[in-house]
Image (cartoon, rainbow, N blue to C red):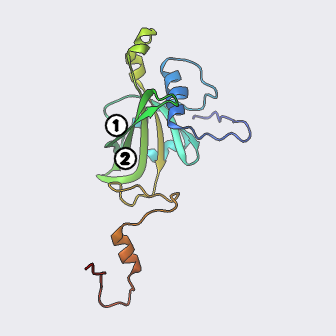
């Protein structure tokens, strides 16, 4: 966030829901409305490596937040952000769909890293154009939430240090229950 450090009120904790990120921050940024507190900076994520976000993005609860212009090329100097093919619709408490969340993983030197990004997009519809808002303006912005996780297997489940009550697969339970001194592995027989 540059040289200027933002001082927040005592007890302030930034832990927004998906709806709050889209409605209270991203939408207001896209239509040039003021937002208080104005804590999420604009950052060209594609010019910064994820481990360099600490001094550039807003940090809260081990997550970095920033606005960025929407680009198709997600390459940085040392790697690239790759979509994992998962997306979630963002709904308001009234049930209206207002946005979309895409998941990306950072790849460096051909290897998947532990850096995960949630990229939030506004949903454009006819009501926004009727209000006079150019739909292209709404599509130009995204808000991103980035964190580093300890990954076990992204294909099955993301398991981080903060997860409690992580469920083990059947094979994990078998391997953990094995005695290291045991010469022979026996599996339960089902008759």
**Can residue 44 be seen by looking at this rendering?**
no
Q: Is residue 41 above or below residue 130?
A: below
| Numbered mark located on residue 105 in the image | 2
Q: From the top left corner, tell me how far across and down residue 138 is, in percent.
A: 42, 20
Quarter of the image where the C terminus is located: bottom left
Residue found at x 52% / y 60%: 164
Front position in the image: 24 or 174:
174
Circle 1 is placed at which residue position?
Answer: 74
Q: CA distance from mark 1 to mark 2?
A: 11 Å
Badge 1 element: loop
Q: From the top left corner, tell me how far across and down residue 105 is, in percent.
A: 37, 47
- Using residue 34 as the reference point, say whether residue 178 is left or right of it: left
Q: From the top left corner, tell me how far across and down residue 173 is, in percent.
A: 39, 73
Quarter of the image where the N terminus is located: top right
Badge 1 or badge 2: first in the primary sequence: 1
- Using residue 132 as the reference point, say whether residue 5 is left or right of it: right
């Amino acid at each position: 966030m540059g040289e200027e450090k933002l001082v927040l009120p005592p007890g302030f904790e930034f832990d927004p829901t998906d709806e709050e990120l889209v409605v209270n921050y991203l939408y207001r940024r896209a239509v040039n409305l003021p937002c208080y507190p104005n804590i999420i900076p604009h950052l060209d994520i594609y010019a910064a490596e994820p481990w360099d976000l600490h001094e550039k993005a807003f940090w809260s609860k081990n997550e970095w937040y920033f606005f960025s212009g929407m680009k198709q090329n997600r390459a940085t100097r040392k790697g690239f952000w790759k979509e994992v093919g998962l997306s979630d619709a963002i709904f308001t408490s009234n049930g209206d769909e207002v946005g979309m969340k895409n998941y990306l993983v950072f790849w460096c030197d051909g290897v998947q890293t532990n850096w995960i990004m949630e990229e939030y997009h506004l949903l454009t519809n006819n009501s926004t154009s009727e209000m006079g808002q150019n739909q292209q303006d709404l599509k130009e912005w995204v808000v991103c939430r980035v964190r580093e996780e300890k990954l076990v297997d992204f294909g099955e489940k993301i398991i981080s240090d903060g997860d409690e009550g992580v469920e083990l697969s059947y094979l994990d339970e078998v391997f953990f229950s094995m005695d290291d001194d045991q010469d022979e592995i026996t599996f339960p027989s089902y008759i």
